[in-house]
Image (tube, rainbow, N blue to C red):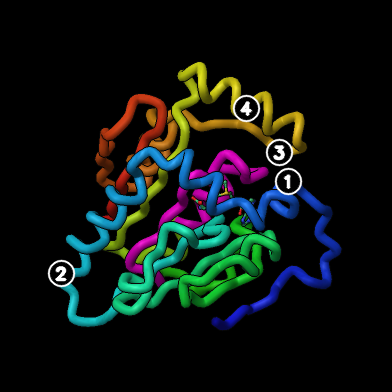
Amino acid sequence: MKLINLLESKGERMNMFDILAPWYDEVRKVIEFGEVKEINREIKKIGKNCQKPLKVLDVGGGTGNHWDIESSEILNLYIVDRNRAMLNECESGANLVHGDVHCLPFEDDFFDIVMCLDALHHFQDRKRSLNEMERVSKTGGYIFVADFDPNHILTKMISIGEIILGEPGRFMKTETLEKFFQKRDYETEKIDFTHYFYLLKSRKF
Ligand SMILES: C[S@@+](CC[C@H](N)C(=O)[O-])C[C@H]1O[C@@H](n2cnc3c(N)ncnc32)[C@H](O)[C@@H]1O
């Protein structure tokens, strides 16, 4: 496992993930809604037609619990997270980058797939993070965003809990996210699997 450290000297303040990190994978098993299976299925489909390993970026990827060894062997996987404790729990064999999604340390048009799972609502500036995801994504590449639907009561409760714990707790509507990508000439597809958690697949042309 290789860890590229971009934040150590910036004196990051402690947040809820410092405390949660050792138990995160266990907690995540309980709050997994089927999105991991859906994304892995999509990635396998995309990978089928590719000769080279896909370059995949997982932003706010945390402990990387959703990546199995099998997929990390066929992918060139990078996980960016600003929380060192979460990355320390990662056993996926990915390239780990201790960095910030608002300022991704990659050149333009670099990744075949960018994904952001249960993380967008933790970012301080969601538009800027989306712009960064878009910037590093190749033309013809895919961006997957999965998050809680803000209209659902469960999301409203999660939001209150997270705000108390010092997180932004701001959830984006699927329609807003779709508009963001469509304005930039992406084709979007909402993959439905549950009514309180969405998965949006966007492809750049
Ligand atoms: C709820 S966890 C999701 C982890 C993983 N994607 C999953 O689905 O299990 C949210 C993650 O986003 C990370 N995060 C929050 N703000 C970030 C930022 N500005 N840059 C990078 N990562 C960030 C947190 O440290 C945390 O690991």
Q: Amino acid at mark 2?
A: Lys
Categorize mark 3 by other alpha carbons within 10 Å: few (<14), some (14-19), many (20+): some
Categorize mark 4 by other alpha carbons within 10 Å: few (<14), some (14-19), many (20+): many
Task: Examine the image and state in which quarter residue 173 appears.
Answer: top left
Mark in front: 1 vs 4 = 1
Distance between the alpha carbons at the discs numbered 4 and 3: 9 Å
Residue in view at x 28 percent, y 48 percent = 38
Residue in view at x 54 percent, y 82 percent = 1
Residue at the disc numbered 4: 159
Would you say 157 lies left or right of 8 here? Answer: left
Distance between the alpha carbons at the discs numbered 2 and 4: 38 Å
Q: Amino acid at mark 1?
A: Met
| SS class, disc 4 | helix
Residue at the disc numbered 1: 16
Distance between the alpha carbons at the discs numbered 3 and 1: 8 Å
Residue in view at x 62 percent, y 56 percent = 102
